[in-house]
Image (spheres, rainbow, N blue to C red):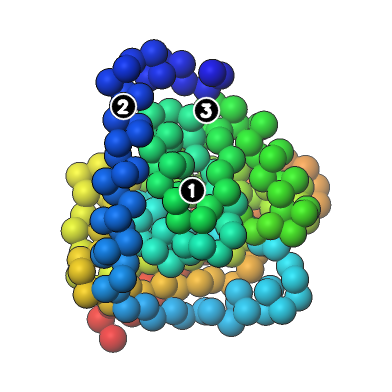
Amino acid sequence: MPGDPGWRASASRRAQASAIPVIVTPLVSAFAATWSWRIDGQHHLDALHAARQPYVLAVWHGRILPGIGWLRHRGMVALASENFDGEWIARVLERFGFTMVRGSSSRGGVRALVRLSAAMREGRSTVITVDGPRGPAHHAQAGAAWVAHHARAPIVPFHIEANRHWTLSSWDAGQVPKPFSRVNVCVGAPLWVPGGGDTAIETGRVALEAALGRCAERAGAMTRE
C-alpha cells in the first residue's frame, strides 16, 4: 500500500496495529467517563454551528488523547499519517466516531489535504494536529491553513490542559489526564485565511501558531482558577 510499506511487511507490526486499538479504546473510554470539562470559547463553535459553517479544528499533537474525549462521536473528519503510529491512532479514532483521511506532510500529503477540503465543501468539519506527525512540537505546519484556504472555511484553534495529568516522554510531550481530573479547553476565535495563494497560506499558518500559543496560555491559566 502506498505510504509506508515498511511496517506493513512485518507480521508483528500488523498484529500490534490490530491489538493496540482493542486495548487503548476501552481505556480512553473509561478515563474520559471520569473527566469533568470546562470550556472557554464555546460560543465560537456555537456561532459556526448556527450558521451551518464547517470549520477546521486545529490542535497540537500532544493533546490527541484528551481531544478524543472531547470530540468523540461528533462526526468529525480527522487526518492521520500512514506510518505505524498513524495506523493504530486512526483505528482508535474510528472507534470514537471519526471519519479518517490518511496522509501527512511527508506521505500522501497533497492527496489527503484535497480529500479534507472536499469533505468540508460537503459540510463536514475537520480536525488536524498541526505539528504532527513528527514535529517539531508546537510548530504549525501549513496543512490546516491550506485546507481552510481551499475550502473557504475558518480555522478554529483550541488547546486542552488538565489540572492533573501524566506527561509522556514523547516528542510531543503528550498529555494523559488522570482519572477524575478537570480538563480545561480553550477555544480560540475563528481565523479566516485570505485569498492570495502561498503567501496567504503562510500568513494563515503564522497566525494559527500564534493563536494556539494564546490558547495554551489561557488553558494553563484555567487549571489554576
Mark 2 to mark 3 CA distance (whole Å):
25 Å
Q: In terms of secondary structure, where does tag 3 sit? A: loop
Q: Could you tell which of marks 1 and 2 lies nearer the N-terminus?
A: 2
Q: Could you tell which of marks 3 and 1 lies nearer the N-terminus?
A: 1
Residue type of the residue flagged with mark 3: Ser
Q: In terms of secondary structure, where does tag 2 sit? A: helix
Horizontal and vertical percent for residue 124? 69, 57
Q: Could you tell which of marks 2 and 3 lies nearer the N-terminus?
A: 2
* Observer-nearest of 103 and 214: 103
Crowd band around label 3 with a 10 angstrom C-alpha radius: few (<14), some (14–19), many (20+)? few
Which disc is residue 15 wearing?
2
Q: Which residue is mark 3?
A: 106
Mark 1 to mark 2 CA distance (whole Å):
18 Å
Residue type of the residue flagged with mark 2: Ala
In this view, the mark in front (3 or 1): 1
Which disc is residue 94 wearing?
1
Residue 34, quarter of picture: bottom left
- Residue placed furthest toward the right: 195
Q: Measuring 67% from the left and 31% from the top, which residue is drawn there?
A: 111
Residue type of the residue flagged with mark 1: Glu
Residue 37 located left or right of residue 209: left
